[in-house]
C-alpha cells in the first residue's frame, strides 16, 4: 500500500526539525566559535583581520601566533554567524576579531629552558662526536683563587654533570684568559692552557703551555703535561694556546718566543704540535720570521689537514701598525712531523 501524501509530509518535517536541532545544539560540531572571557590571553590561528568594530572597518591584519588579551565581547552581529571579540594585541593593530580565528593561550615562540652549568666565567663549549656537550669555564677555589672547571651533558643539555676542578695551580688561569678544550674521536677530553712561570717551575721563569686529559668524561684528569719547549731566561715564553681534535689525537697551536731561528725573545713565532694519547710529538715552527706573530686560531678538516691563522706584526716587535697582516698555513697529517 502506498504511503499517503500527508504521511510523507509529516515524515519530512520530522527529519527537518531533527537536523535543525542538531545544527543549533550547543554540543553541535557546527558551533565552531569558541568563547573567551575578558582578560583572557589569546593567540591568532592564522592571518587574521582586525576591525574597528565588530564586523566593521578593516584596520589591518595580525599574523599567525600573534598574542593578545580579550578586552570586550562576545558580540553577535545580525546576519553574521561569527562571534566577535575586542583584542588588545602585543603589537598594532588592535581591535575586533572573529572568535573563530582565536585560541586560548599563547602560541608564539616558546622561550628555551635554561640550565645552570656551574659558577664561573670565560666559558668554552664544544660538541664531541658522540653528541655530548663539553663545557669548560674559569671558576674559583675555596680561597677565591681562579681555577678551571669542567662539566659535561650527555642528554642534549637537559642536565650537566657536577663540575670537576682541573689540576691547575691557582692564579695560572687569570680571567678573562683561560684554557681551550677539544674532544678526541674516542671521547677523551684535552684541555690546554697557559701556565705562569711562577706556577710551573723549570721553565726559566717564563710562561709555558700545559695539557691535561680525561678519559672518563671529566671525572678524573691526568697530571699536567708540558707542551711547549723550554725558553730563554728572558722574554715571555709560550702563551695563547688553541687546540682542535685531529686524527686519533689533538693538534695544539700557540705563540712562543723560544723555538726556531729567532732567539731575540721579542719576535715570537707560531708553533704547532700533534698530541697522541696525551704525548706531544715534535713541534713545528710554522712562521720563524723576524716579525712578531701571535693570536693563533686553529681548525681541522675531515682529511686531517690543520689550518692555522695568526696576526703578524711586521713592525718587528713594536706597536701594532696598519700594515699588520693575517697569516695562514695548512699542515697535512694533523701537523705531525714525518719521520
Image (cartoon, helix red, strand yellow):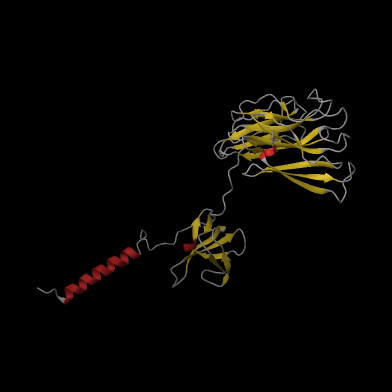
Q: Is residue 135 visible?
A: no
Image coordinates for residue 131, horizontal then vertical, percent: 56, 40
Residue 205 shown left or right of residue 250 in the figure: right
Query: With respect to residue 261, does 225 lie above or below?
Result: above
Q: Is residue 88 visible?
A: yes
Quarter of the figure that contains the N terminus: bottom left
Query: With respect to residue 130, does 84 lie above or below?
Result: below
Residue 90 shown left or right of residue 336 in the figure: left
Q: Residue furthest bottom?
A: 5
Q: Residue furthest left?
A: 1
Which of the pair 176/253 is nearer the observer? 253
Quarter of the figure that contains the C terminus: top right
Query: With respect to residue 323, does 143 lie above or below?
Result: above
Image coordinates for residue 274, horizontal then vertical, percent: 69, 34
Residue 50 shown left or right of residue 198 in the figure: left
Which of the pair 152/195 is nearer the observer? 195
Which of the pair 1/264 is nearer the observer? 264
Q: Quadrant of residue 192?
A: top right
Query: With respect to residue 133, does 2 lie above or below?
Result: below
Q: Quadrant of residue 231?
A: top right
Image coordinates for residue 328, horizontal then vertical, percent: 75, 46
Q: Residue at x 82, y 35 (%)?
A: 260
Question: For the image shown, how many numbered marks are present on the structure?
Answer: 0
Image coordinates for residue 227, horizontal then vertical, percent: 73, 30
Amino acid at each position: 500500500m502506498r504511503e499517503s501524501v500527508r504521511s510523507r509530509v509529516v515524515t519530512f518535517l520530522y527529519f527537518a526539525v531533527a537536523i535543525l536541532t542538531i545544527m543549533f545544539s550547543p554540543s553541535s560540531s557546527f558551533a565552531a566559535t569558541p568563547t573567551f572571557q575578558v582578560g583572557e590571553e589569546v593567540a591568532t590561528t592564522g592571518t587574521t583581520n582586525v576591525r574597528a568594530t565588530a564586523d566593521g572597518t578593516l584596520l589591518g591584519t595580525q599574523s599567525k601566533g600573534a598574542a593578545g588579551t580579550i578586552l570586550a565581547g562576545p558580540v553577535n552581529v545580525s546576519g553574521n554567524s561569527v562571534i566577535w571579540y575586542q583584542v588588545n594585541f602585543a603589537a598594532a593593530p588592535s581591535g575586533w576579531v572573529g572568535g573563530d580565528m582565536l585560541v586560548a593561550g599563547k602560541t608564539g615562540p616558546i622561550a628555551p629552558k635554561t640550565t645552570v652549568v656551574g659558577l664561573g666565567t670565560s666559558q668554552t663549549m664544544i660538541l664531541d662526536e658522540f653528541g655530548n656537550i663539553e663545557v669548560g669555564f674559569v671558576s674559583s677555589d675555596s680561597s677565591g683563587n681562579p681555577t678551571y672547571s669542567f662539566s659535561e651533558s650527555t642528554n642534549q643539555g637537559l642536565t650537566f654533570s657536577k663540575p670537576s676542578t682541573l689540576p691547575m695551580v691557582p692564579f695560572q688561569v687569570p680571567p678573562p684568559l683561560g684554557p681551550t678544550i677539544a674532544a678526541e674521536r674516542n671521547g677523551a677530553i684535552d684541555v690546554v692552557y697557559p701556565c705562569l712561570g711562577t706556577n710551573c717551575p723549570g721553565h726559566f721563569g717564563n710562561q709555558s703551555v700545559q695539557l691535561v686529559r680525561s678519559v672518563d668524561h671529566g671525572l678524573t684528569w691526568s697530571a699536567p703535561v708540558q707542551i711547549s719547549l723550554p725558553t730563554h731566561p728572558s722574554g715571555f715564553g709560550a702563551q695563547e694556546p688553541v687546540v682542535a681534535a685531529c686524527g686519533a689525537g689533538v693538534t695544539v697551536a700557540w705563540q712562543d718566543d723560544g723555538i726556531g731561528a729567532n732567539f731575540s725573545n721579542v719576535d715570537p713565532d707560531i708553533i704547532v704540535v700533534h698530541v697522541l694519547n696525551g704525548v706531544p710529538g715534535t713541534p713545528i715552527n710554522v712562521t720563524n720570521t723576524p716579525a712578531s706573530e701571535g693570536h693563533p686560531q686553529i681548525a681541522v678538516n675531515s682529511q686531517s689537514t690543520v689550518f692555522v691563522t695568526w696576526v703578524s706584526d711586521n713592525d718587528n716587535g713594536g706597536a701594532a701598525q696598519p700594515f699588520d697582516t693575517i697569516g695562514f698555513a695548512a699542515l697535512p697529517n694533523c701537523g705531525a712531523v714525518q719521520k
